[in-house]
Amino acid sequence: MLDPLDLAKRLIAAPSVTPATGAVFDELETMLTPLGFAVHRFTRGEGAEGDDEAPVENLFAIRTGPPGSRHFAFAGHLDVVPPGPIGGDNGWASDPFEPQVRGDLLHGRGAVDMKGAIAAMVAAVADVSQDAGTISFIITGDEEGPALHGTRALIDYMAAQGLSPDLCLVGEPTSVHRLGDMVKIGRRGSVNIFIDVDGTQGHVAYPHLADNPLPKLVAILAELDALTLDTGTQWFQPSNLEITEITAANRAHNVIPAKGEARISIRFNDLHTGKSLSDRVCAIAEKHGGHARPVISGEPFLTEPGAFSALVAAAVEAETGTAPELSTTGGTSDARFLRSVCPVIEFGLCNATMHKRDEAVAIPDLAVLARIYTRIAFAALALEEG
């Protein structure tokens, strides 16, 4: 087996703040080519740096097995969130893109989310013979960003080439307290809704000459906040609606503002769709004289427990002694797109330090994760259809 620690260091040392392009993909290609993978890279997006249309690099690598063999895919992302300051009381102890080993931990941005997992995937496939079946890597540079030109573009590429996998594992950091304690078999959906209410600006001493939008906005938010969307399902926690922003852009104490604005975020289970919730919020906003604009970023999905989840759980327990919990908790991931291609499950490292300063992975966990991924790949390729 290749050393996943060395591979993780190489990936971390290639800065790749979202949207990622260039050097970090060079590193991954250099790792995969000697293992027999044909690597295809392409860029999508033509906007300026810093906007949602900024160029994003994607990579699809495939090692084709015997004719008619199963196709198993590893999926993930090489982009990372901005690291923040270095030094001082609130900064990193070392350069976030200079991997450092301190004790049993490897520090660096992306160590957990999710360059460490990709390193474990590469190390894992080195121990899977080509005769076992077809293996691919679906890797984007746009998971931490708007996710417009990343995995969705890769799905289009695979469909055009006739290379869609039968099963897929996403290496997001799903473990909570120790490696192997949680596997994600689904995710809730997500919709952000922007609400605005127009009024007429005026002096507070002459309210009859103005139209204050804020009482209307307050009424909208009060009705929304009082909603009970559901009480959860067998596999999903209750949907929740949260008010995330309220503003009137009014710095004067004696002025009735011309406009009030708010934003809500809903994370919802499979009792709803993004459209059904958006329509409900829009109706409440309009009832009180407001307008709502929804942005749906993902629908809920569930990979029903069965043969796929069982083989993943068996691989985890064989290497860790832990029977993982099957869960749908947490935020969204690119699995929300991949679920349209094939059954998808998420499993990866402990998530305690993801997106934090001094992000770190336990070095022994990298080796254990690589062995788990090897077991999963062998079992997925041997799994009979249906």
Image (cartoon, rainbow, N blue to C red):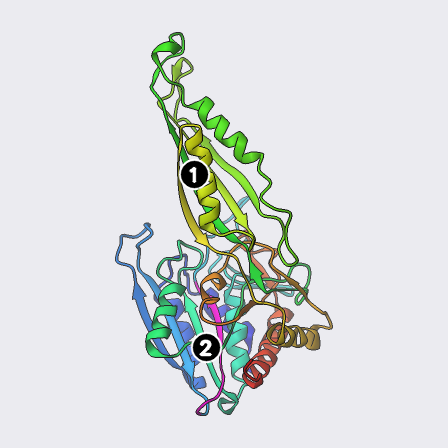
Residue depicted at 58% across the width and 47% down the height: 239
Left/right placement of residue 135 relative to residue 161 reads right
Q: Is mark 2 on a helix, strand or loop?
A: loop
x, y percentage for residue 109? 50, 58
The residue tagged 2 is 165
Tell me which numbered mark, 1 or 2, is placed earlier along the sequence: 2
x, y percentage for residue 177? 68, 59
For the question of whether residue 85 can be seen, the reply is: no
Dot 2 amino acid type: Pro
For the question of whether residue 15 can be seen, the reply is: yes
Residue situated furthest right in the rendering: 321
x, y percentage for residue 48? 27, 52
* Above or below 176: residue 137: below
Q: What stretch is highlighted in magenta?
A: 67-78
Residue depicted at 72% across the width and 69% down the height: 322
Residue 73 magenta-drawn?
yes
The residue tagged 1 is 282
Question: How many neighbours does mark 2 have within 10 angstroms: few (below 14), some (14-19), or many (20 or more)?
Answer: many
Residue 25: quarter of image: bottom left
* Above or below 61: residue 101: above
Residue 28 magenta-drawn?
no
Residue situated in front as seen by the camera: 244 or 372: 244
x, y percentage for residue 348? 58, 66
Residue 211: quarter of image: top left
Residue 184: quarter of image: bottom right
Q: In the rendered image, which quarter contains the N terminus?
A: bottom right
